[in-house]
Image: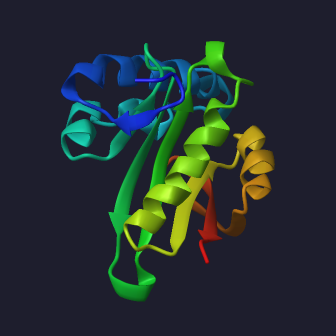
Amino acid sequence: MTSDEIRPATQADVSAVTTVTDAAYRPYIERIGVVPQPMEADHAADVAAGKVFVTGDPVIGLVVVEESGDGPSGHLLLKSIAVHPDARGTGVGRRLLHFVDTHARALGLHEVRLFTNALMWENQRIYPRYGYRAVERRVDGPYDRVHYRKRLD
């Protein structure tokens, strides 16, 4: 695997997926006052279901995606994107976001959706640069979330 390749995660990657996710999201715990949902995900189940794609050897970044809906309302939900802090600023996040678009198109989907915590202000500056449009802010349990959509035409 080249260092730029993005591939489906395997069970052998579960530990690395957990490590990268925890490293990427841990700094937000104090700011948002709760553990970010991606840190509590069942990474082994997500990997087994084919929802996780990783990059790097060792793994330095990943996305967790889920196909949702059918027909014209179908979309790809970007449940999590995580880049290890040591790899920030190296283009890993950009490559992962482009991969999500490509993956959605390969599935015949014309929209990507995601949400981020309202207090993760860094993300709210990043996502619009990649074509995402904020469509809603909603409180889901302890999470105050900004929801985004991106049309893939």
The C terminus - image quarter: bottom right
- Residue 21 percent coordinates (x, y): 47, 26
**Can you name the residue that lies furthest to the front here?**
2
- Residue 142 percent coordinates (x, y): 51, 47
- Residue 25 percent coordinates (x, y): 55, 27
- Residue 28 percent coordinates (x, y): 63, 28
Question: Is 69 placed left or right of 112 in the picture?
Answer: left
The colour mode here is: rainbow
**Can you name the residue that lies furthest to the bottom here?**
72
The N terminus - image quarter: top left
Q: Residue at x 51, y 58 (%)?
A: 102
Q: Residue at x 66, y 40 (%)?
A: 94
Q: Nearer the viewer, residue 127 or 33?
A: 127
Q: Is residue 86 above or below residue 72?
A: above
Q: Is residue 1 above or below residue 50?
A: above
Q: Nearer the viewer, residue 28 or 112?
A: 112
Query: Can residue 31 be seen by looking at this rendering?
Result: yes
For the image shown, how many numbered marks are present on the structure? 0
Question: Is 7 placed left or right of 62 in the picture?
Answer: left
Q: Residue at x 47, y 23 (%)?
A: 2
Question: Is 68 placed left or right of 99 in the picture?
Answer: left
In terms of image quadrants, where is residue 54? top left
Q: Residue at x 29, y 22 (%)?
A: 13
Q: Is residue 25 above or below residue 101?
A: above
Question: Is 120 placed left or right of 34 in the picture?
Answer: right
Q: Nearer the viewer, residue 143 or 9?
A: 9
In terms of image quadrants, where is residue 133? bottom right
Query: Can residue 144 be seen by looking at this rendering?
Result: no
